[in-house]
Structures are given as C-alpha cells and as structure tokens.
Amino acid sequence: MPRSAIADLALATLALIASVAALKFAQNLIAPIVLGIVFAVVLAPAVRILTRIGVPASVCAFGALVLTGLGLATALAAISPVISQFLEEIPRLQFQVFQWINSITDAVGASGSLGQNITDLDGDEAMAAAIPSLLSALWYAPNFMAQLLIFSGTLFFFLLTRDDLYGVIPSKADDLRRADRAVSHYFTTIALINAGLGLAVFAATSLYNLPNPILWGFAAFVLNFILYLGPISLIAALFVSGGIEFQGVMILAPALTFLAFNLIEAQFVTPALVGQRMHLNPLGVFLAILFGLWLWGPIGGIVALPVLVWVSAFAIPSEGTDRTLSAPKNQPQQS
C-alpha cells in the first residue's frame, strides 16, 4: 500500500476516533439536538402538508412543539404514579428475589451467606438504595431542564427553517425530503404497532394478576423501539416477576406470552404494515443500537435506528421514491 494511502487511512481513523470522542464528551448538548431533529423529521411531512394549504410555517412549527410537549407531559403524568408505586414495591420484590436465589443455592448445596447478608437489609435501607435522594434529584434537575430546552428549540427551529436548510444543497433537497418521509412513515407506523403491543401486554399481565400491569404495558411500548435488546430485557424482567409471583410452570407464562406477542408483531404485523421494499443488514442494525446505547444511553438507543433509516433512505437513488424500511424477514424483533 502506498505511503499516501496509509497516511490517509491513519488520518481518517484518527478523525473517526476524535468524532466519536467528541460525541461522547458533548452528550448533554448533542443528544437532545439529535433527538429533536428525529422528532422534527417525523413531524415534517405533516407540517409540509399544512403549509401547502396556507397555514404559516411558524404556526405549524409552534403547534408541533406544543403537541409534542403535551404528548410527553401526558405520558409522564400517566406513568409517574405507576412508577412511584413500583418503587414502593422494590424492597418487597428485592426480598423475594433474594429468597428465590437462596432457595436455589440451598438446592445445589452452595453457601447462603451472600443471600443472607443481602436480605439482612431492612426495607428502609433497600428503599434508600432504590430511590434517589431529594438532593440528587435537585442536582440533576437543571441538567434535565437544559436538555429539554435544547430539544424544544431544535424541534421548533428545524421545522421552521427546514426548507431553507435543504435549499442550501438544492441537488440533494429532494433526496433529503424523501428520507424524511421514510423516517416519518417508519416511526409513526412502528409507534402504532408498539402501542398495540403495549395494550396486549397490559391485558395479559392484568389477566395473570401481575403487579403494575400498566407499567408492563408502557415498558413494552418503549422498549420495543430498541431493537433486539429491548424485548430481551423485558422477557428477562417478566421471567423474574413470574418467578416471584407464581409457582411451577406459571413462572414462565408471562415471559412466554410476551415472546409470542413479539414474534407475531415481528414476523407478521410489522412486515405487513411497514413493507419489505428496503432492507437493513441485521448485524448493522444490532451494532447501531449497541453503539447508540453506549454513546448516549437510552436516548442513543431510541435515535439510533431512525438515524440509520434516514441515512439508508437518503443513500437510495432518487428513482426509488417513497421507500420505507422493515427489518429482514425471519428476524425475531422489529423496532
């Protein structure tokens, strides 16, 4: 390999490492910006339709911001009491889990000292370990409000000036708008599918009399956006909850029920509604999700796939208009 090529490769590698380090270091700034752009891209086609019928762009952008804020606030208001109740149950669940572990270790002849030491914690100590202190909450509140302001500003101004931004590169404006439509179609459809999955999980957990069925349904809705890893996490949580609440074969019932729902959604519902006209490599999707989670935590896991969809749609030649995305067939999960 020529020295110039080696030098170019080395510079490109260093630039990539520096870029990733910058994204990681500036997480509090860049993560809400990217999240705001993703939401704006999802809402962009609807805003474009409204502007075509004469609604001012500023009104459309402000309305989208207000609706997004109301939606997020409503979701938080609906789920906060459930989360509070769940946190109050943590000491009891923790005690039952450690009792379960002790019974397993006793069955195999292992020492129960570890489980005994842990279960010696009283409820107040367990609650203190589970629930952040008021000081910690106040410490993180300014950071949260700053990120919320960044997200809101990005969402509003991107929708307001989207056409101007795309007009900077006229040769790519149509491709950019087509990528927006692909992401909007994908995200909206997947959100509706995940809402149906959440309702099904809520009904099943209510039927099984598991504690906090609303929380299980909400968790299914949110985690299903995180391809592969989200459903696996929920299956593990349902298995633990089943082990705490039930005996015998019923221990597996909640986890197996969600697995069945997930397979139906991934193999039949999502391919039928999203379409099979554009494919992403499953390994690429999996690595993108892992990278997003490592880079920005839950926000990174949520935005990783929409960003990948946008990049893939943008890379499609302009002759293939209005293409959408679905994971390849025979994959265990779609988000």
Image (tube, helix red, strand yellow):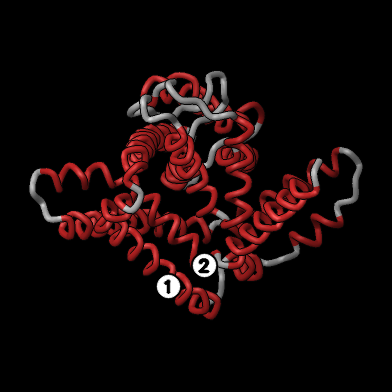
Left or right: where 224 falls relative to 7? left
- State the residue at coordinates (72%, 48%): 9
Dot 1 or dot 2: first in sequence order is: 2
- State the residue at coordinates (49%, 20%): 267
Residue 245 quadrant:
top right
Query: Where is residue 44 shown, x and y percent of the image?
Result: 28, 46
Q: Which mark is residue 146?
A: 1
Dividing the image into 4 quarters, which one contains the N terminus?
top right
Query: Where is residue 225 shown, x and y percent of the image?
Result: 48, 41
- State the residue at coordinates (66%, 29%): 248
Front residue of this view, candidates 208 and 232: 232
SS at badge 2: helix
**Which residue in the structure is indicated by mark 2?**
28
Front residue of this view, candidates 172 and 247: 172
Residue 151 quadrant:
bottom left
Left or right: where 263 falls relative to 118? left
